[in-house]
Image (cartoon, helix red, strand yellow):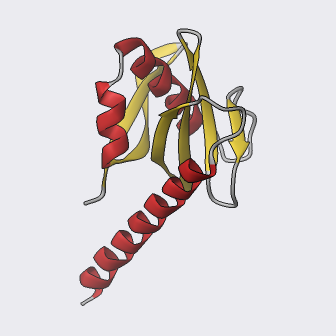
Amino acid sequence: MLYHEKTLQCNLKNNPDVIFSWPIAFYNLVWEELEASPSGLRGSCKAALRRLAEAQPGAPTGLRLEKLQSAITELKVSWNRQEFRLLFFREQSVVYVVNFFQKKTRKCPPSEIARAVGRMTEIQVDQAKVLTRSLH
């Protein structure tokens, strides 16, 4: 598979016995890059992704989000006076993170957007193949 799903969990503030889970799928390279990053950055990214996953699409999240294309959205994360970006798309109730990089320019570089779109297409084609095989 080109990606793997993780489940981010958190407890309700007023009831620590209730746990909610949100599916987030990471393109394999993105997961490897995120896991290899410093623990503080990794924690900031995962916290932002948890907030993103628990929010209803279109509802205010308090996160810094920017729509880059019809399907690709940029999640902006600050850590240690540096800016990082997670590019993702949503399909049904799953958030697919398809790119992760340090921001060095004001606008998101077209090459990073193209990479995210290409990876999104790979995931969608892979899912279609799995669905086709399960129907036969």
Q: Residue furthest bottom?
A: 136
Left/right placement of residue 44 relative to residue 1 reads: right
x, y (%) of residue 117?
53, 60
Q: Residue at position x 36%, y 16% from top? A: 38
Left/right placement of residue 101 relative to residue 68 reads: left
Relative to 58, say whether 84 is above or below.
above
Relative to 81, say whether 12 is above or below.
below
Relative to 22, say whether 12 is above or below.
above
x, y (%) of residue 24?
43, 44
Q: Residue at position x 33%, y 39% from top? A: 31
Relative to 34, say whether 16 is above or below.
above
Q: Residue at position x 45%, y 26% from top? A: 46
Taking depth in this image into account, of 116 and 26 the one nearest to the observer is 116
Q: Could you say which quadrant of the image residue 134 lies in?
A: bottom left
- Residue 92 seen in the figure: no
Taking depth in this image into account, of 10 and 104 the one nearest to the observer is 104
The quadrant of the image that shows the C terminus is bottom left
x, y (%) of residue 26?
38, 46
x, y (%) of residue 71?
63, 59
Left/right placement of residue 31 relative to residue 84 reads: left
Q: Could you say which quadrant of the image residue 62 lies in?
A: top right
